């Protein structure tokens, strides 16, 4: 369906393409600030390619934009792109032609979150620690557990201009902090060999933690893991008070805090912003968890960590907002 006034706008396509969902929307390049129109989430498993998903969205909206910005859950290097957690690959030039675009901008999905950060209103952020500066005080660490674990860095200011540094920080090596975490790392070592932070801080990561703590025997991936539970089922069980699920989710939150604190130390961050769909499913549990205890537990630098403002992004579509902001810039 076509929105009223569509023909009077300078419409562009924006997308946030993750391992689970492909989210699309439109933005108006004639507006003074980035805005989102007609957002829609499509399940990646329902489509053979990014092209097919994008065409389905454009047909549903009746829009025919000539410009687009797509945030992709993958390193953006060269013209041939392969998603990290979805079996989609594409060529930038071919996709531009197939979607009949004059201009196609690609950016890392967490670079898009960083683009969005200065445009988030106060009600788009929930404070865990410190003040809610508007815009956030840089440097800003962006981190988020979803299908994978994304990390980016935002430096600068509104006055001096912002600079975004995309990273693959979610794939840094996991550092256990106690006996239970060493047991989890050993369990994951059998399954995957090298143990990255993403192996624990993602939807699959919560399933891994839960399976390990319940005594499920590890098997070498990609063999099926008998006895594993879906992350949604673990969250639902934890919120209902099931002891095993509560234990797993508490450990997930504690590991999340330690990893976010490490990223903040590495970035010299004044603000840490947490994105990703996982936490929004158990926000009250997360706020009451040991996340902040682990975040600040940095030995001689514990007091240093106290100065950082830590917030959860509650905006429903920060990746789309960031893609729109990148196009507007």
Image (tube, rainbow, N blue to C red):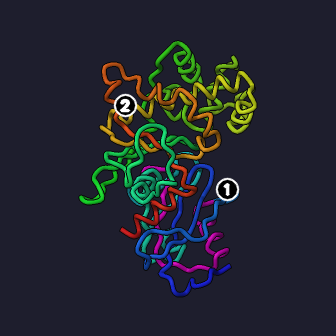
How far from the left and from the top, in percent, is residue 166? Answer: 38, 49
Disc 1, SS: strand
Extreme left residue here? Answer: 160
Number of numbered labels in the structure image = 2
Disc 2, SS: helix
How far from the left and from the top, in percent, is residue 42? Answer: 66, 60
Depth check, mark 2 against mark 1: the one in front is 2
Q: Residue at x 36, y 45 (%)?
A: 140
Quadrant including the C terminus: bottom left
Q: Residue at x 68, y 53 (%)?
A: 45
| Residue density around tag 2, few if under 14, some if 14–19, many if 20 or more, within 10 Å | some
Vertical comparison of 23 with 314: above or below = below
Vertical comparison of 241 with 273: above or below = above
How far from the left and from the top, in percent, is residue 153? Answer: 36, 46
Q: Residue at x 55, y 50 (%)?
A: 314
Question: Mark 2–mark 1 contact, CB under 8 Å?
Answer: no
Name the one closer to the observer, 88 or 110.
Answer: 110
Q: Which residue is mark 2?
A: 306
What mark, if any, has residue 43 been given in the picture? 1
How far from the left and from the top, in percent, is residue 17? Answer: 55, 56
Q: Sequence order check: which comes first, mark 2 or mark 1?
A: 1
Name the one closer to the observer, 100 or 324.
Answer: 324
Extreme top residue here? Answer: 179
Vertical comparison of 303 with 312: above or below = above
Q: Which residues are magenta?
A: 49-76
Quadrant including the N terminus: bottom right
Q: Residue at x 43, y 50 (%)?
A: 75
CA gap, disc 2 and disc 1? 39 Å
| Residue density around tag 1, few if under 14, some if 14–19, many if 20 or more, within 10 Å | few
């Amino acid at each position: 369906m076509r929105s009223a006034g569509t023909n009077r706008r300078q419409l562009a396509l924006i997308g946030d393409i993750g391992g689970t969902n492909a989210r699309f929307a439109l933005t108006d390049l004639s507006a003074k600030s980035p805005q989102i129109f007609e957002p829609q989430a499509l399940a990646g498993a329902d489509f053979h390619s990014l092209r097919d998903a994008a065409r389905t969205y454009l047909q549903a909206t009746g829009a025919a934009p000539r410009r687009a910005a797509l945030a992709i859950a993958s390193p953006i290097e060269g013209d041939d792109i392969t998603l990290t957690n979805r079996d989609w690959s594409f060529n930038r030039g071919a996709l531009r032609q197939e979607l009949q675009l004059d201009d196609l901008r690609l950016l890392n999905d967490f670079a898009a979150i960083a683009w969005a950060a200065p445009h988030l209103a106060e009600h788009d952020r929930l404070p865990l620690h410190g003040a809610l500066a508007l815009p956030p005080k840089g440097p800003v660490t962006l981190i988020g557990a979803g299908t994978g674990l994304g990390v980016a860095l935002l430096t600068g200011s509104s006055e001096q201009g912002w600079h975004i540094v995309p990273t693959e920080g979610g794939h840094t090596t996991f550092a256990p902090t106690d006996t239970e975490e060493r047991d989890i790392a050993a369990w994951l070592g059998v399954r995957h060999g090298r143990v990255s932070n993403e192996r624990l801080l993602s939807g699959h990561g919560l399933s891994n933690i839960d399976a390990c703590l319940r005594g499920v025997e590890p098997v070498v991936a990609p063999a099926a893991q008998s006895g594993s539970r879906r992350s949604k089922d673990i969250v639902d069980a934890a919120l209902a008070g099931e002891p095993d699920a509560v234990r797993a989710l508490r450990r997930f939150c504690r590991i999340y805090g330690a990893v976010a604190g490490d990223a903040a130390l590495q970035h010299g961050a004044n603000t840490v912003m947490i994105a990703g769909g996982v936490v929004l499913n158990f926000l009250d549990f997360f706020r009451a968890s040991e996340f902040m205890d682990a975040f600040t537990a940095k030995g001689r630098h514990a007091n240093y960590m106290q100065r950082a403002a830590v917030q959860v992004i509650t905006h429903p579509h920060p990746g789309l907002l960031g893609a729109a902001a990148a196009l507007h810039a």
